[in-house]
Amino acid sequence: MGFGEFDSDANTSAATGPTQSAKIVVAGGFGVGKTTLVGAVSEIDPLTTEAVMTEASVSVDDTTATPNKTTTTVAMDFGRLTLGDDLVLYVFGTPGQHRFWFMWDDLAVGAIGAVVLVDTRRLADAFPSIDFFENRKLPYIVAINCFDRLLHHQIEDVRQALTISESVPIIACDARERESAKQVLITVVEHAINRDRELQPG
Amino acid sequence: MKGVSNGADAWDRLHQGTDREGLDSPARFVLTKKPVVLQVRTPVRPTPAAARGAVGVAGPGMPPAQSRGGVASVRTRTMMRPYARTGGRTKPDYELALEALVSTTDRGRVPQAVTGVQHRRICGLCVEPRSIAEIAAYLDLPLNVVKVLVSDLDNAGLVLIHQSGLCFGDRSSREFMDRVLQGLRRL
């Protein structure tokens, strides 16, 4: 630090690094791949409070369609993406079970938007998340997680089945792949910006 | 007199209590937000041979090895309730977002300035800016406990809090979202 006079200003300020942060929420039914999607885009190992699903929770959580799932997110998990020198994006997965509804408020406040991840074998699981974001007027998109890389249903059929408006984007994705997961996040932000323009043109 | 005895019956009935008393007791409900999964550390139990050797050294009059093993397996881990760390406060002075970034100020880096184990851990962690959620995950504390602790540190000028304050229909918010979009596309 040879230039003491010039550096003094930087020294008195707080730590250098990101000072702005944004948040995107990933919601969806139990076992739909939220944790997988967060892990695919995050630059750090997702921070999570996961516990092995116990026999007690097997009777509570519906595992008929996902028999191989052995863990479940009991609190919430999130990943981090550095988008610039001073900007960080956090991607939060919602708690899978509805007993953790109380955490959703904390998650939704201040979020840019949300992804409702859908497994077409269990479409009905997406309804609680969609209702929540509709009520909160939080921009959301629907991402169909294509297990086996197969889109089992036409996107417009899914739109009809979920009874969501034309303005909500629906895309297919593979939650395991970074590029695909990244595209999901880009779609969320684009949709949020479009929604914002509609609300406040100009 | 009949009326009086009826009154006494009613009084007794009133004070009998209900069958539900045990069921409705607040102690039955878990009041912490975060479900805590305690990892019970398996104690280092001396092998029977080693224990017997130890007994031999201590003297022949000592109790048998089995009972000593039993003493060793008693949990020594402290089970401090999370909100004891916040002096019983469950809400911070102001709302803090999960993604709000916290960074330690120069004052916060002076070890003597920060009192309290948890406060010191937060100041140590946030030398690089970290979000409320990250602090909770790294320090394994409930989110609300972290919010209270961070607001304490902020009041004392030991950390800086950067809240995003996104608001739809707001020009600066739109510019902010554009920057997020550009950042994502660049990845």
Image (cartoon, rainbow, N blue to C red):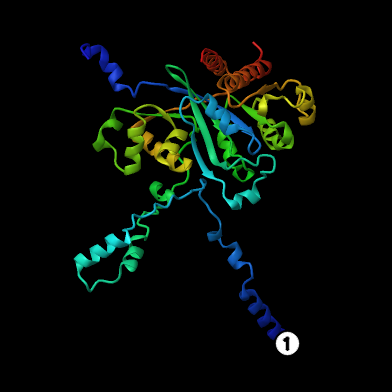
Q: Which residue is mark 1?
A: B2
- The location of residue B122, given as percent across then percent down, is 36, 36
Left or right, B2 with reference to A175: right
**Label 1 crowd bin: few (<14), some (14–19), many (20+), radius 10 Å:** few
On screen, B133 above or below A201?
Answer: below
Secondary structure state at the residue bearing disc 1? helix
On screen, A109 above or below A85?
Answer: below
Residue drawn at x 71%, y 22% is A168
Left or right, A152 with reference to A93: right
Q: Is residue B33 visible?
A: yes
Residue drawn at x 72%, y 36% is A122
Quadrant into which the N terminus of chain A falls: top left
Residue A183 lies in quadrant: top right
On screen, B65 above or below B138?
Answer: below
- The location of residue B98, given as percent across then percent down, is 50, 33
Left or right, A182 with reference to B61: right
Amino acid type for the residue under numbered disc 1: Lys
- The location of residue B66, given as percent across then percent down, is 34, 67
